[in-house]
Amino acid sequence: MLNTVLQQPALDFILLSVLNLSRCDINDLSSNAFNRVRNLQLLDLSFNLISTLQDRVFSSLTKLKTLHIYGNHYLSRVDPYAFYSLSLIRELNLANSMLTKISANTFAGLRLNSIDLSNNRLEDIEAFSFSNLSANVINFEGNIIKQFNKETFTGVADLKLLRTPSFKFCCIRPNYLDEHNCFPTKDEFSSCEDLMRHSALQFLLWLFGVLALFGNCLSLIYRLKVDRKRLKLGYGIFVTNLAAADFLMGVYLLIIAIADAAFRKR
């Protein structure tokens, strides 16, 4: 019944300030469902079956201070400007849903203490997704982002803490955000510009890679061509296998060294 009501502007309670619609199996919200409850200050839509938040679906709720929308585990799409005019809310929790993409200007106009997009199925966060957003904390950990956009955080203001799936996102954080307030922190070897950030590491990578490759290649040739009789002994088989494994490690190290040289300072 409630699901049908929210597909049209049937709610007509102009003085209503608190509306709890949690756990009502709601799966659809029309763009004008809340046009006649304009004085709402708290709206609870948690733990429903909502899959889509349309453009400006909450646009009439200019006095709304609290929006509970967590627990909608089937939520897979949020249109740009879906939260338009909700300038008074301070927390937005969209964690543990099925979002696959965040489009540009999705959160435009919001002034938040925190926004939680963690543990979704995000593969793409478009450029300017956080444009015209003020947020102290942004969290989108637990996602596998396949599309990397350098302008992802362009336009976000007042950011104090950023939690991401990978340190590479900290490389495009806003300039005013300190590196220590972006997680995860960088490892001991890499930086935003280099796979191997120290020249000593770069030199040793090439040195060990070349030595492992050619040294073990000669060892394998010697065992297979000159000293084949030892291959019949347990010791000979063990040493040959070890040389083959070290040869492959040399190949691996050289692949890393080549990638480091190819993408250096980028």
Image: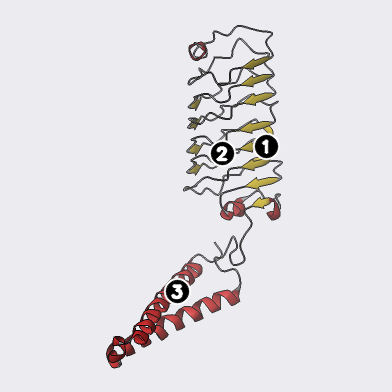
Residue 254 circle label:
3
Most foreground residue, 158 or 117 = 117
Camera-side mark, 1 or 2: 1
Residue 129 circle label:
2
Q: Give neighbour class at mark 3: few <14, some 14-19, many 20+ (Cα, 10 Å).
A: many
Q: Earlier in the sequence, mark 3 or mark 1?
A: 1
Residue type, numbered disc 1: Ser
x%, y% of residue 48? 53, 23
Name the secondary structure under disc 2: loop
Q: Earlier in the sequence, mark 3 or mark 2?
A: 2
Camera-side mark, 3 or 2: 3
Residue depicted at x 68% and y 41%: 137
Most foreground residue, 241 or 149 = 241
User: Residue at label 1?
Assistant: 114
Most foreground residue, 233 or 5 = 233
- Image: 161 above or below 242: above
